[in-house]
Amino acid sequence: MFLAMTDEVRVIIVKLADRLHNMRTLCHMPPHKQSSIAAETLQVFAPLAKLLGMYSIKSELENLSFMYVSAEDYEKVTSRIANLYKEHEKELTEANRILVKKIEDDQFLDLVTVNTDVRSVCKETYSIYKAALKSKGSIDDYNQIAQVCVVHSSPSCIKVTDCCKAKTFCGGRASVQSTTGEATMKRICYHVLGLVHEIWKPIPRTMKDYIATPKPNGYQSLHTTVIPFLYESMFRLEIQIRTEEMDLIAERGIAVYYNGRALSAELAENPIPLSRKSRGKTGCLNNTDFALRYDVSYDSFFFQIGWLNAIREWQEEFVGNMSSREFVDTITRDLLGSRVFVFTPKGEIKNLPKGATVVDYAYLIHTEIGNKMVAAKVNGNLVSPTHVLENAEVVEILTYNALSSKSAFQRHKQWLQHAKTRSARHKIMRFLREQAAQCAAEITQDRVNDFVADSDSDVEDLTEDSRKSLQWWEKILVNVKQFQSQEKSRNATPASQNGSVWVPKVNGKHNKAVKNSSLESPEFFSPGDGIAKIFPANIPAYKEVLPGLDSWRASKIDSWHHLEGHSIEWLCVVSMARKGIIAEVTTVLAAEGITVCSCVVRASTAEIDRERGLAVMLFQIEANTESLVSVCAKVDLISGVLGWSSGCSWPRSADNAQVLEC
Ligand SMILES: Nc1nc2c(ncn2[C@@H]2O[C@H](COP(=O)(O)OP(=O)(O)O)[C@@H](OP(=O)(O)OP(=O)(O)O)[C@H]2O)c(=O)[nH]1
C-alpha cells in the first residue's frame, strides 16, 4: 500500500475509506479479530489519515479503535466527558455568547462583511485519553474538553471547492483571485484572535500560529487557550480561528485536492506523463506534475508532496536492503509517529520524528549533506551533532568536501548512535562501509612506527628527542621519495615493495600535491624561506578561505625557532570558529600527555569568510609518536574540526633548515 501510494495518492484515500467502513462494521467480527484490526488501525491507518490531514476520518478511526482496544478506558473517558460537559455546559454557553457578541459588535468585521460561525465542540474521546496519558495524571483530573471554533467566510471570496475546480481547469487566473481573498481572510483571523485576547487573557505558551506555519498535513488555524471565568472556575477553553477554506482542509486534508470526477475527466483528455518511478504503469498521477500543471499553490499540497517524496526515496534506497518488517517499522515510527518541525536557513519547513537529531536532519536534506557534514548550527549557534531537534529551530548543516575517509569514518561511526531515524542509520552504515574500504590504504600508526624502527639515519648534532622525531619524519620523507620515483618510473598506480598498492595520503586524503611536486625541484630542499614542503596540507578550501595559511604557519614556526633554537614539533588544527573549541582541543592534548609549549590562533571571521568563520590553532608540542597519532584521531572527532596537520621543523642553523609536514 505504501509503495503504491507514492505513485498514486488516491490509493491511500480509497484504503482509508475502506478501513473506516470495516471499523464501522467491526461488531460483526469475532472478538480476537476485532482487537487485532482495531490495533492495526490505531498504529497505521489513523496516523496515516492524520498525516494526510483527513481529520474527520482520523478521529472516527481512533474513537472506534479505542473502543475495541481498550473498552474499559473508553468507558471511563466517555463518562468523564459527559460529567464534565454537564458541569461546564453553562460556562461554555456563556463564553460562546460573549465571543459572538464581541464579533458582532466589531466595526472592522462589519466593514469587511464576513460571515462568522462560532461553534462549540467537545474534543475527541481518544484525543482526551491521549492527553490525559501524556500529562501522567488520571482521567478524573483532566478538565480540558471544550473547543470553540471560529470560522469565517466571505461571500465575495471564492469557496475552496470552487477554487479547486477553478485551479484544476483554469490554472493561474483563478489562483490569483483566490490568493488575494486568502490574504485578507488570513488577516481577519489575526484580527479575531486580537478580539479573543481582548476579552480573555491567553494561558502562556498555548498560542499557536498554524497559519504562518502550517502543519505538514496542510492544517492552518490560530489556536489559543483561555480560562474565561478565571475567578470562578478553572474551566479551560481552546479557541481555534480559521477561514472556511482552512476549515474544509482541516476536516478533509489532502482529499480536498482530489476531486475524483474532475481529475479523471481531465486525465482522460490529457494524460499526464508517467513519473520516473511509475514502473510501466499507465494512468499514474505524478504529484509534482499535478502541482505544477494545475498551479495548485496551496502550501499544504507541497507539504504532502514532501513526505510522499520521502517514502519514494526510501523505497528506492531501502527496498531490497531492508526486510518488509523493517520497512514497515521505518514508516510507522519515522513517518507516522510524533513529529518535530524545523526550518532550513531558507525558511523551508522540514519535519522529522520526535527525538531526531541534527544528524537525522542532515540525512533528510540529502545523503551527501549527511556524508559531508562536519558541524551544525541551530538558531545560528554551533551545536553538537547529537543535538536533539526542537520545534521551530532553524537548522543549518555545515559541510566540508575535503574530509579524509579516516576522519569521516570516525565521525560517522560516532554519529551512528545519535541517528534516531532508521533511514539516517541505514545511510550512515552504507557510508561507513565505503569509507572503511578507503581507509585501508591510509598511513596507519603501524606504518609510521615501521618507519621509525627501520630508521638508520645518524644525526649527531641534535638532542635525543629531536633526533627521534627527525628520524621519524625522515623516514616518511624517504618513503615519499620512493613513492615518487616509483610513480615516475611507472607513471601508474604506485605499489610498495611487497607489491601491495600504497598511495600516501595527507590527513588520510590522497594528496594531489605529492603527485604534482617533484622531489628534485630546486626549491624542495633549499633552505629558502626555511620551508621544505614534503606533504603540503593539500586542502584547497583552506587556501580559499584562509589565504596565506602556509606562510602564516611558517612565520610562526620560524619565530619559535628564534626563541628556542632547536627542532620544533607542531600540530595545526583547522576548525570552524566556535566558542570553546580551543578548550576542547587542548583538553584532548592534555589527556594524551602532550605538552603544549606555545600556541597561536588565527581566526577568519566576517571579512574573510562571512558564511562559516574558520579558526586555525597552531601548537608547539612535545609528543611521542603514539600519543600524537592518538591525539590526531581524537581531535578529528571534535565537533567543528575540519582537519589537522602535524610536522617537525629544525632551525636554519642546522644545514637543512626544514619543516616536514604530514
Ligand atoms: N483538523 C486538524 N485539527 C488539528 C490538527 N492539529 C491540531 N488540531 C486541532 O488542534 C487541537 C490542539 O492541537 P495543538 O494546538 O497542536 O496542541 P497539542 O500540542 O495539544 O496537540 C487538536 O486537538 P487534540 O485534542 O490535540 O487533537 P489530536 O491532535 O489529538 O487529534 C485538534 O483539535 C490537524 O492537523 N488537523
Image (spheres, grey):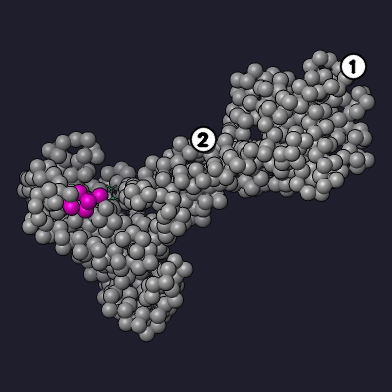
Residue annotated with mark 1: 460
Coordinates of residue 523 in the picture (x, y in percent): 91, 39
Location of residue 640 (image quadrant): top right
Query: In the picture provided, is 186 more to the left or to the right than 423?
Result: left
Please say if 392 is above or below 388: below
Q: Is residue 440 magenta?
A: no
Q: What's the residue type where badge 1 is placed?
A: Glu
Coordinates of residue 90 in the picture (x, y in percent): 8, 51
Coordinates of residue 553 in the picture (x, y in percent): 78, 34
Specify start and end residues of the magenta stretch as a single range.
37-43
Query: In the picture provided, is 589 more to the left or to the right than 516?
Result: left
Residue annotated with mark 2: 414
Is residue 91 at least partly visible in the picture?
no
Q: Residue at x 72, y 41 (%)?
A: 501
Q: What's the residue type where badge 2 is placed?
A: Gln
Q: How crowded is mark 2: few (under 14 residues within 10 Å), some or many (20 or more)?
A: some
Is residue 507 at least partly visible in the picture?
yes
The quadrant of the rendering that contains the C terminus is: top right
Query: In the picture provided, is 276 more to the left or to the right than 154?
Result: right
Q: Which residue is drawn at 76% across and 29% down?
A: 647
Q: How crowded is mark 1: few (under 14 residues within 10 Å), some or many (20 or more)?
A: few
Please say if 497 is above or below 43: above
